[in-house]
Image (cartoon, helix red, strand yellow):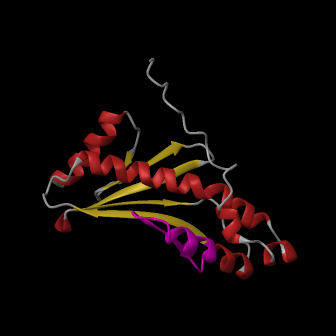
Amino acid sequence: MTATSELYATVLSVFATEGWSCEEVAGREVVRAGFEAHHTRVDLHVQVFSALSAVSVVSESPLTCPGPAHRERLAELLMRVNQTLTVGNFELDWDAGRLFFRVTNLFPTPQGNPGIIRGLIHTTVGEMDRIAPLEAILLRADGAALASLDVAALLRREDLLPEVPVPDSPAS
C-alpha cells in the first residue's frame, strides 16, 4: 500500500466535505468525478503532483469533431474563449477532435489549500458547461452554415447562459 501525500489527502477531504462522490484511481493520486451542470454532465479528473505541490483538474467534452473543417472552427472558438479566461484554458486534441478544459495550481505548502482546490473544480465544471452549447451549435453546423458561422457573435449570445439568481434587496 502506497502512502498518499498531504496534498492528495486535502483533495479527498474537499470531496468528502462537499459531499461530492468520486472514484479513486488505483495506484495514482487521481480522482474521477462527474457533475450535473446547467447544460451538460461534466466528467473530470483531479490529479495531484505531490513533488510539485500541484493539483490539475481536467474535463473532456463528450463530443467529437466530425472532420477538419469543424476542428478549425472549434480551434477558433477555443482561442477566442481562452483570450477571456484568467484561470485555466481550453485545449483541443487535434487528432482525436476532442475538447478539454484544464486548470492547474501550484501550492506553496505540501498540503495545499482546500478553498483553492474547491475553486479549481468549480471553475472546471463552470467553464466546460459554459462552452457546451457553443460547441454543440458549432459541431451541428455543416457546409456553408459552418463556413459562415460567426464565432465572435456566437460567443456574445446571452440566451445560452443560465440565469443568475439575484439576492433579495434589503428592506428600507
Residue sitting nearer the eye, 130 or 18: 130
Q: Is residue 118 above or below residue 155?
A: above
Q: Give how far across and how far down residue 51 sits, in percent.
A: 17, 67
Asked if the magenta segment contains residue 96, the reply would be yes
Quadrant (top left, top right, bottom left, bottom right) of the C terminus: top left
- Give the side of residue 154 with respect to residue 95, left or right: right
**Residue 4 visible in image:** no
* Picture quadrant where residue 124 is located: bottom left
Residue sitting nearer the eye, 131 or 48: 131
Asked if the magenta segment contains residue 111, the reply would be no
Q: Is residue 55 above or below residue 18?
A: below
- Give the side of residue 112 with respect to residue 80, left or right: left
Name which residue lies at 25% across and 40% down: 13
- Give the side of residue 95 with respect to residue 24, left or right: right
Q: Give how far across and how far down residue 66 sits, in percent.
A: 73, 72
- Give the side of residue 84 with respect to residue 56, left or right: right
* Picture quadrant where residue 94 is located: bottom right
**Residue 140 visible in image:** yes
Name which residue lies at 52% across and 66% down: 100
* Picture quadrant where residue 78 is located: bottom right
* Farthest right residue in view: 144
Residue range corresponding to the magenta coloring: 75-97
Name which residue lies at 35% across and 49% down: 119
Q: Give how far across and how far down residue 44 sits, in percent.
A: 46, 54
Q: Is residue 24 above or below residue 67?
A: above
